[in-house]
Amino acid sequence: MAVRQSRYLLRRSPMTHIRLRNNVHHTSFEDGTGVLLDGRSGTYWQLNATANRVLAERTSGKSTEQVAHEIAGPGNSELSSIVRDDIRSLVGQLVSAKLVERCA
């Protein structure tokens, strides 16, 4: 059986970045917590220290995988997987609440 080389290359999808929507303001506090203020509705969202760190690092351009690895620590792939799922859930909630938007 001969193996033919495919003319189609598999490509990884581009890393999706997130950014705050234009009407949203983010503030961090000394204790690591933070607040998101939706300027349209006047609603604010309190972030615990971990959520605030995730938001700051994801909006600065780090990937979900990078942030999960940093939080879980080196050599802890099981915890990293759990953290990665939590980050995806958090970002999904922030997108649904129209506080952040995904961008390529």
Image (cartoon, rainbow, N blue to C red):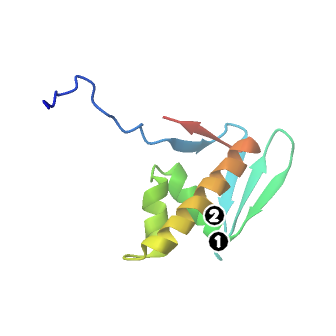
Question: What residue lies at 44% left-to-right and 69% top-to-bottom?
Answer: 70
The residue wearing badge 2 is: 52
Q: Residues within 10 Å of mark 2 (few under 14, many from 20)?
A: many
Residue positioned most to the front: 1
Circles 1 and 2 in contact, beta carbons < 8 Å: yes
For residue 81, side relative to residue 35 (left or right): left
Q: Which of 11 and 66 is in front in this view?
A: 11
Question: What residue lies at 65% left-to-right and 55% top-to-bottom?
Answer: 89
Residue 49, by quadrant, is bottom right
**Is residue 71 among the parts visible in the rendering?**
no
Q: Where is residue 1 in the image (x, y as percent from the top left)?
A: 14, 32
Circle 2 sits in a helix, a strand or a loop, which is it?
A: helix
The residue wearing badge 1 is: 49
Q: Position of residue 54 (x, y in %)?
A: 57, 61
Q: Position of residue 28 (x, y in %)?
A: 65, 64
Placement of 53 over or under 96, stated as above or below:
below
Circle 1 sits in a helix, a strand or a loop, which is it?
A: helix
So how many labels did they put on this image?
Answer: 2
Residue positioned most to the left: 2
Q: Residues within 10 Å of mark 1 (few under 14, many from 20)?
A: some
